[in-house]
Amino acid sequence: MWEYMERRAVRCAEYILETGATVRDCAAHFNISKSTVHKDVSERLAEIDAALFAQVRRVLEKNLAERHLRGGDATRRKYEAKNGKKRRPSKAEDG
């Protein structure tokens, strides 16, 4: 493997660990594709540093488990912005 690929994989892994970033966030931060980040941290990193790979894998698994929540939040924000932040009162508020 080329040295620049190893350095990039380690830098991405360290960024993900420090910030808890998703693959998409990491790709945007380093201005590289999501596919490159994914290959770096899921395949190349395992060959370079197994301990770092295990730590990053835990963060990525957590992000994957929370993905549906972030998507729901994004949809809610989209429609709130579109509708001028109208919100129906909940049953508890309706009283």
Image (spheres, rainbow, N blue to C red):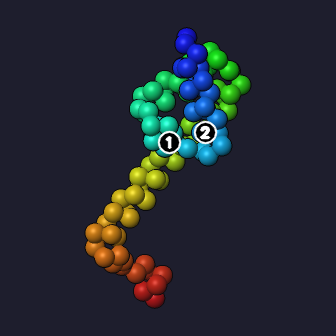
Q: Do the numbered discs 2 and 1 sit on residues whose CB atoms are within 8 Å?
A: yes
Foreground of the two, 42 or 9: 9
Q: Position of residue 64 (x, y in %)?
A: 51, 40
Q: Which residue is mark 2?
A: 15
Q: Which residue is mark 1?
A: 29
Q: Residue at x 43, y 59 (%)?
A: 73
CA distance separating discs 2 and 1: 9 Å
Tag 2 secondary structure = helix
Q: Quadrant of the N terminus?
A: top right
Q: Residue at x 46, y 88 (%)?
A: 95
Q: Is residue 23 visible?
A: no
Looking at the image, residue 86 sits to the left or right of residue 32; the answer is left
Q: Position of residue 92 (x, y in %)?
A: 48, 81
Furthest residue toward top = 1
Three-letter residue code for mark 1? His
Tag 1 secondary structure = helix
Q: Residue at x 68, y 20 (%)?
A: 49
Looking at the image, residue 43 sits to the left or right of residue 56; the answer is left
Foreground of the two, 91 or 15: 15
Furthest residue toward right = 51
Q: Position of residue 18 (x, y in %)?
A: 66, 43
